[in-house]
Amino acid sequence: KYCTAMLRALKKHRDAGPFLKPVDVVALNIPDYVNIIKYPMDLSTIENKLKGRLYADTQGFTDDLRLMFNNAYIYNG
């Protein structure tokens, strides 16, 4: 329940837009993204994993959130 509530809040955040769907390297014209980011993550992927009960515990959910934000930091600086 905690993870679902957290995900819902993150999706509603005013700055969530870039994190809602997987990065579209073609539309954004960033072909180097796939060479820099080896493990892409976004909120829709996290939501699908949560709904599919693919997280063994809350740590897996938290790890994916950290991965998503770290990817943004690594690629964008």
Image (cartoon, rainbow, N blue to C red):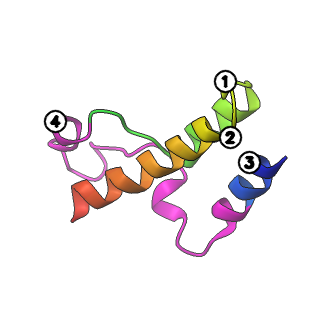
Asked if residue 26 lies left or right of residue 4, the reply is: left
Q: Quadrant of the C terminus?
A: bottom left
Asked if residue 2 lies in the magenta stretch, the reply is: no
- Say which amino acid is labelled 1: Leu
Residue shown at the point (28%, 43%) measured from the top left: 25
Q: Helix or strand or loop: what does disc 3 sit on?
A: helix
Task: Answer with mark 1 or mark 4, whichever residue precedes in sequence.
Answer: 4
Disc 1: which residue: 54
- Say which amino acid is labelled 4: Asn
Task: Answer with mark 4 or mark 2, whichever residue precedes in sequence.
Answer: 4
Comparing 49 with 34, the one in front is 49
Asked if residue 61 lies left or right of residue 63, the reply is: right
**Cα separation between marks 3 and 2:** 7 Å
The percent coordinates of residue 73 (x first, y second) are 30, 60
Which disc, if any, is residue 3? 3
Residue shown at the point (16%, 36%) measured from the top left: 35
Disc 4: which residue: 35
Q: Are marks 3 and 2 in contact (CB under 8 Å)?
A: yes
Residue furthest to the right in view is 1
Nearest to the eye among marks 4 and 2: give it. 2
**Cα separation between marks 3 and 1:** 12 Å
Disc 2: which residue: 58
Q: Which residues are magenta?
A: 9-37
**Cα separation between marks 3 and 4:** 30 Å
Residue 5: image quadrant is: bottom right
Give the crowd class for mark 4: few <14, some 14-19, many >=20 residues within 10 Å: few
Residue shown at the point (33%, 50%) measured from the top left: 71
Asked if residue 43 lies left or right of residue 22, the reply is: right
